């Protein structure tokens, strides 16, 4: 029979190992012009264009990868590069320029050779990724600017 102290030691080391392992993985900022950047942004673009009903490009705030996870923080822009006038989209009734953000946040996971959107926040007004940290046991620094 194991002593109380031994059980506590085993539980403590088991609880610490995943965090240590996760911390050992680095967060990589995906550089402009890389194939991985294009692949991630192309996957994020699909639901954004579907929502807006127009073609978009992205102004990237943050694009980071942590193992098989990626986080994209982007501003949708009209194909010509200008800001989107949300009053001329499907969001015209609901968009309030002074209150709503001009952001799309996306959490993706690698599936084989491609990426899949796991969670998305379209024009969020809150720090939605805090829930993603908890739900998927991801490091907070994946979502934070360096």
Image: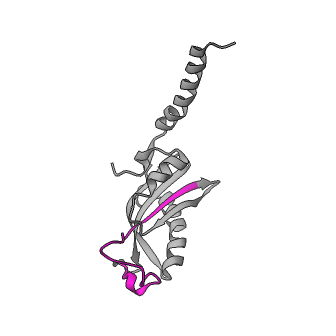
Residue at (45% x, 76% y) in the render: 56
Residue at (36% x, 71% y) in the render: 100
- Where is residue 12 drawn, in percent x and y? 54, 25
Q: Which residues are magenta?
A: 84-109
Q: Nearer the viewer, residue 25 or 142?
A: 142
By what rule are the colours in the image chosen?
A: one colour
- Establish if 9 lies above or below 102: above
Q: In the figure, is residue 113 to the left or right of 137?
A: right
The part of the image, by quadrant, that contains residue 91 is bottom left
Q: In the figure, is residue 37 to the left or right of 109?
A: left
Q: What type of secondary structure mainly makes up the magenta span?
A: loop
Query: Magenta segment: does it hold 30?
Result: no
- Where is residue 35 drawn, in percent x and y? 50, 60
Residue at (48% x, 79% y) in the render: 52
- Where is residue 63 drawn, in percent x and y? 43, 57
Q: Nearer the viewer, residue 131 or 116?
A: 131
Query: Magenta segment: does it hold 97?
Result: yes
- Establish if 131 lies above or below 49: above
Q: In the figure, is residue 69 to the left or right of 81?
A: right
Residue at (33% x, 72% y) in the render: 99
- Where is residue 71 drawn, in percent x and y? 47, 56
Q: Which residue is the extreme one toward the bottom?
A: 88
- Establish if 19 lies above or below 79: above
Quadrant containing the N terminus in the rendered view: top right
Q: How many marks?
A: 0
Q: Which residue is the extreme one toward the right?
A: 1
Q: Which residue is the extreme one toward the front?
A: 4
- Establish if 16 lies above or below 138: above
């Amino acid at each position: 029979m194991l002593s109380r102290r031994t059980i506590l030691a085993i539980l403590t080391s088991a609880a610490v190992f995943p965090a240590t392992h996760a911390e050992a993985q680095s967060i990589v900022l995906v550089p402009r012009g890389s194939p991985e950047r294009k692949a991630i942004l192309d996957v994020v673009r699909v639901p954004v264009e579907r929502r807006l009903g127009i073609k978009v490009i992205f102004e990237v705030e943050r694009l980071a990868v942590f193992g098989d996870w990626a986080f994209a923080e982007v501003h949708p822009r009209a194909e010509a590069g200008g800001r989107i006038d949300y009053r001329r989209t499907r969001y015209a009734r609901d968009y309030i320029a002074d209150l709503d953000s001009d952001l799309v946040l996306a959490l993706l996971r690698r599936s084989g050779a491609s990426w899949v959107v796991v969670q998305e926040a379209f024009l969020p007004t809150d720090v939605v990724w805090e829930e993603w940290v908890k739900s998927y046991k991801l490091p907070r620094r994946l979502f934070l600017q360096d």
